Amino acid sequence: MDITIKDLEHRYQMKTPFERLALFDVNAEINEGSYVAVIGHTGSGKSTLLQHLNGLLKPTKGSVTLGGTVLEAGKKNKDLKSLRKKVGIVFQFPEYQLFEETVLKDIIFGPMNFGVSKQKAEEKAKELLHMVHLPEDVLERSPFELSGGQKRRVAIAGVLAMEPEVLVLDEPTAGLDPRGRQEIMDMFYDLHQKSGVTTILVTHSMEDAARYADEMIVMNKGTVKAKGTPRELFSKETDISSLGLDMPETIKFQSLLQQKLGKSFSLPALSIEETADEILALLQKENAL
């Protein structure tokens, strides 16, 4: 489903001495089946924005339209349960949300709560274990006996068991080592490619935004400062730097190499593979002269 965010504003603790403006004038469109990265430094409003995508927070002004559901300031919504089935959120440290006696019970809890039969929910749980790269023998184990990385994969399987149309990832690799981070991000990208699920990645990692996203939304001080493809936005180094954000390491390396060699690359490299291709193209061009 398409998502339209129009003139969104959110204030915490309204009409109290502690009232705080967290979002204002936020406008964005997210097309069905796209992969969008929402980036910004700490306190930019990223997490507040994502909580509006399934009604955890309500607009204090403006609206969020998700398919046929409209969340609008001042109006009550009776069908939030249906919306929360369609929009799955993987929060930072999702393993903290595990609570059942076994891995199986944790994964099937959500689907059964929405009326899926136990048999179908269990079949889906076994299928998802393979997707998140866990052995089937963990199903009867307590999730609290597993390693940190395994717990996270179980929690992710629990979100995927709901078969959401939109998957929102809030810093999903927080606390993982580099290998674990790469595995989790590749897993989500593979899921996006195969299922076509709309994926929204909330992150401060410029590398992840550059490598995986089709579009980027840059947040700063509670509002949208820039939108565009990773290549478009990372071509404007001064604009990104002015918002307190860093450039991806591949682009910083490419920029340094250009300075040292006095040569220009044809496009900003968004991954190690692209960096290697650009260097190879440059060498081949030099050899041809």
Image (cartoon, rainbow, N blue to C red):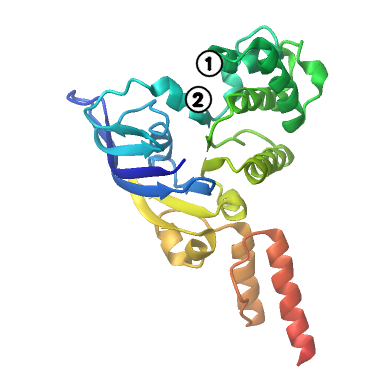
Which amino acid, mark 1? Phe
Q: Left or right: 158 with respect to 102? A: left
**SS assignment at label 1:** loop
Residue 203 position within the rendered picture, expressed as x and y whole percent measured from the top left: 52, 43
Q: Which residue is mark 2?
A: 85
Q: Left or right: 74 with respect to 216? A: left
Q: Left or right: 74 with respect to 29? A: left
Residue at the (61%, 79%) spot, across then down: 264
On residue 154, which mark appears? Answer: none
Q: Left or right: 120 with respect to 221? A: right
Check if mark 2's residue and mark 1's residue have beta carbons within 8 Å. yes
Residue farthest bottom in this picture: 289
Q: Residues within 10 Å of mark 1 (few under 14, many from 20)?
A: few
Query: In 3D space, how far apart are the residues under numbered discs 2 and 1 (Cα atoms)?
Result: 8 Å
The disc, 2 or 1, on the residue closer to the chain's N-terminal end is 2
Residue 133 position within the rendered picture, expressed as x and y whole percent measured from the top left: 77, 31
Q: Is residue 270 visible?
A: yes
Residue at the (22%, 29%) spot, across then down: 19
Rendering quarter of residue 159:
top right
Query: 108 or 285: which is nearer to us?
Result: 108
Query: 1 or 260: which is nearer to us?
Result: 1
Residue farthest top in this picture: 101
Which amino acid, mark 2? Lys
Q: Residues within 10 Å of mark 2 (few under 14, many from 20)?
A: many
Q: Which residue is mark 1?
A: 114
**SS assignment at label 2:** helix
Quadrant for the C terminus in the image = bottom right
